Amino acid sequence: MQGIALVDILDKKEVREDIYEAKDFTYIFKTYYSRVYNYIYYRVNCHYTAEDLTSQVFEKVMLKIDTYSETKSPFEVWLFAIARNSVSDYFRSLKKYKFISIDTIKELISKKKTPENILEISETNSELLNALNILDTRERNIVALKFGAELKNKEIAEVLDLTENNVGVILYRTMKKLKKELERGDKYE
């Protein structure tokens, strides 16, 4: 239903010309923030980096909203293409430097959790991250778009320029690969 309301906003010519009004951009921000953040978090696995990149995405959306064309693709697809490109730029910039982010380590520590809980969460996250590391970039992207951004296969297909069936097959094989990797890790414990 929210997507329909957004289309209504973008379809109105007077609103389209005045999209920079705070209330219209606020609507877009509130509607998509958590999905964009989740997608990015799935990709970068760091709360602080995900927040920064999400802010960059919405800044780009605000600056480039006049380039959006509803005849080319739905707004959601355009938005997640910007998010995907921002994540790709981030990883490209990291290739220059190999380091472990202190922010990533900070997320494992919380005053509310016991040391046992922290260790358990850390081991589970570590297993999942190790399993995700066996995936190639396209597979990680599809997983992040599906589960982080909660996009449908059709929308993922438009973002990645694949067929909907291809996305489904890749997602199925990727989940099978992840399950096999996680089960393999359990056998060694």
Image (spheres, rainbow, N blue to C red):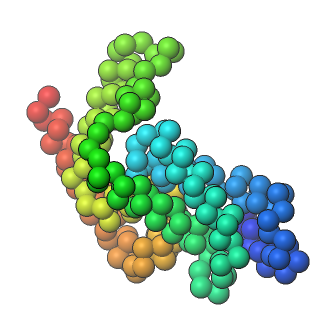
Residue 145 seen from this side:
no
Quadrant of the rendered image containing residue 171:
bottom left
Query: Looking at the picture, how far across and down is residue 126, in whole percent?
Result: 28, 35
Residue 88 seen from this side:
yes
Give the left or right position of residue 180, taking residue 79 as reference: left
Q: Nearer the viewer, residue 171 or 114?
A: 114
Q: Which residue is drawn at 41% across and 55% down?
A: 90
| Vertical arrangement, residue 173 with respect to residue 30, above or below | below
Residue reaching furthest left?
A: 188
Q: Which of 75 and 179 is in front in this view?
A: 75
| Vertical arrangement, residue 38 with respect to residue 2, above or below | above
Residue reaching furthest front?
A: 96
Query: Looking at the picture, how far across and down is residue 156, in whole percent?
Result: 47, 70
Q: Residue at x 56, y 52 (%)?
A: 54
Quadrant of the rendered image containing residue 91:
bottom left
Quadrant where the image shows the N terminus: bottom right
Give the left or right position of residue 102, taking residue 63 as reference: left
Q: Residue at x 38, y 20 (%)?
A: 118
Residue reaching furthest bottom?
A: 71
Q: Residue at x 19, y 42 (%)?
A: 183
